[in-house]
Image (cartoon, coloured by chain):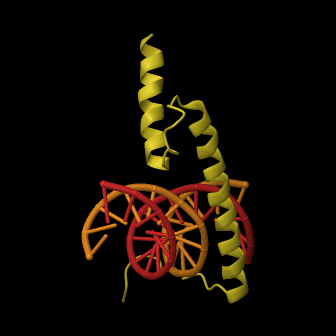
Chain colours: A yellow, B orange, C red
Amino acid sequence: SHSGRSRRKRVITTVQRQAANIRERKRMFSLNEAFDELRKKVPTFAYEKRLSRIETLRLAIVYISFMTEL
DNA sequence: TAGGCCATCTGGTCCT
DNA sequence: AGGACCAGATGGCCTA
């Protein structure tokens, strides 16, 4: 009665879920490491408090555009 | 107290 | 099958 392939929902055990959560945590950690690297490369005033991720991205865009213009 | 930022969990989809 | 990637939901913390 339904059209299209019946897509099987992947069943996940608690253990697999926990493992997946850990992997995800690691993945986000490495993402944040990359953000830290970018933060260091983007020009800012020393007294300024740490840029958020979105601020880092936006400032990087502005900075790159500026340098390209030069 | 509302809004911004972030960590984490979760369940999809895509890739190997 | 299982991992990587992704986006939505949720809750905590901090500051205007």
Residue sitting nearer the eye, C3 or A3: C3
Residue A6 shows up from this direction: no
Q: Residue at x 54, y 82 (%)?
A: A9
Q: Position of residue A35 (x, y in %)?
A: 59, 45
Residue A68 shows in this picture? yes
Q: Nearer the viewer, residue A5 or C13?
A: C13
**Rendered position, C15 above or below A66:** below
- Residue A24, position as x, y percentages in the image: 64, 66
- Asked if residue A59 is positioned above or below residue B12 in the image, the reply reads above
Choose top left, top right, bottom left or bottom right for residue C16. bottom left
| Residue toward you, B16 or C6 | C6
Which residue sits furthest top?
Answer: A70
Residue at left 41%, top 76%?
A: A4
Count how many numbered circles sit on residues in the image.
0
> Where is A42 relative to A70, above or below?
below
Q: Is residue A4 left or right of residue C1?
A: left
Relative image position of residue B5 (x, y in whole percent): 45, 56
Say whether residue A30 is left or right of residue B5. Answer: right
Q: Relative to A10, is C12 on the left or the right?
A: left
Position of the N terminus of chain A by quadrant: bottom left
Quarter of the image for residue A25 reads bottom right
Q: Residue visible at 62% across and 59% down?
A: A28
Q: Residue at x 49, y 44 (%)?
A: A51
What quarter of the picture does the C terminus of chain A occupy? top left
The image shows residue A32 at horizontal and vertical percentages of 61, 52
Front-most of residues A20 and C13:
C13
